[in-house]
Image: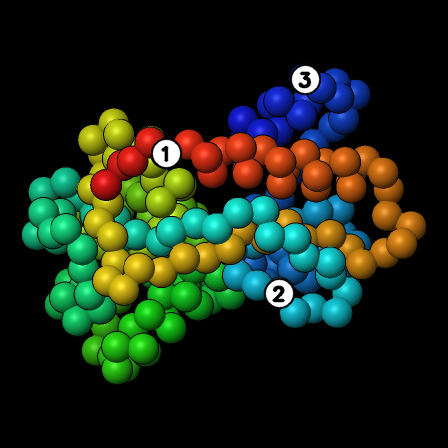
Amino acid sequence: LPPILERFKRKYPRVLPRVTMGNSRHIEEGVASRDMDIGFIEVPTEHPGIEPRIATQEELVVICSTDHPLAGHPHLTARELVKHPFIDRDPGNGIRQIADEFFEAAGIAGSEITLCAELGSLAAIKQLAAAGLGFAIASERAIRRDVLEGRLAAIRLEPRIYTPLEVLLPRDKFRSRLITTFADYVCEEFARMAKDKDAVI
């Protein structure tokens, strides 16, 4: 989001962005209640007060320290992962929901997973993973720089899993032109970025 905001701000210098961080549930509720003009979440929404747009699709990968026992694998199954401490997201987070479904599909109960931590901040998750305290599941694009700079290893999941990045707009025919313009711009930027074929794994 920061580079997209930077380019939008250069195009529309009078716009004052105010960014609030939160999990998917918090963002969804904020847009539906009109406390937020626009939101971005990583799971599909069915809220009647929201107009969702799929901006792009992201692959989810395992992240861990470069010297973690998992780091050398070409891909990892849920059964291989369950032997190691897991750094999970906070309740209400979209990626947490998808990770839960990944383990459940493999017949793994929550009681079989060794939780290392539950964190709402991706920066904190990356820091704990880089320190070797456990593995986490994250969007490939969100950890690309960390992998390229050697702070983290990224390993594909087997089977591979993807998540949509949805742009949320209030379902309101009187929505401002600026909000619609920004939503259009974000979707165009993500479509352009999705064409980038630089591999990190």
> Mark 3 Cα within 10 Å, few/some/many (few <14, many 20+)?
few
Q: Real-space Cα distance between discs 1 and 2?
A: 28 Å
Q: Secondary structure at mark 3?
A: helix
Q: Quarter of the image holding residue 45?
A: bottom right
- Closer to the camera in the image, 183 or 70: 183
| 59 left or right of 114 in image | right
Residue 169 vertical position relative to residue 78 in the rendered view, above or below: above
Q: Secondary structure at mark 1?
A: loop
**Residue at figure coordinates x 46%, y 35% from the top left:** 195
Measured as percent of width and height from the top left, residue 56 is found at: 53, 47
- Closer to the camera in the image, 40 or 88: 40
| 76 left or right of 69 in image | right
The amino acid sitting under disc 1 is Lys
Mark on residue 197? 1
> Mark 1 Cα within 10 Å, few/some/many (few <14, many 20+)?
few
Q: Real-space Cα distance between discs 1 and 3?
A: 26 Å
Kindly identify which residue carries mark 3.
10
Q: CB of mark 1 within 8 Å of CB of mark 3?
A: no
**Residue at figure coordinates x 81%, y 35% from the top left:** 178
**Residue at figure coordinates x 17%, y 71% from the top left:** 79
The amino acid sitting under disc 3 is Arg
Residue 68 vertical position relative to residue 43 in the rendered view, above or below: above
> Mark 2 Cα within 10 Å, few/some/many (few <14, many 20+)?
some
Kindly identify which residue carries mark 2.
45
- Closer to the camera in the image, 176 or 85: 176
| Residue 184 visible in rendering | yes
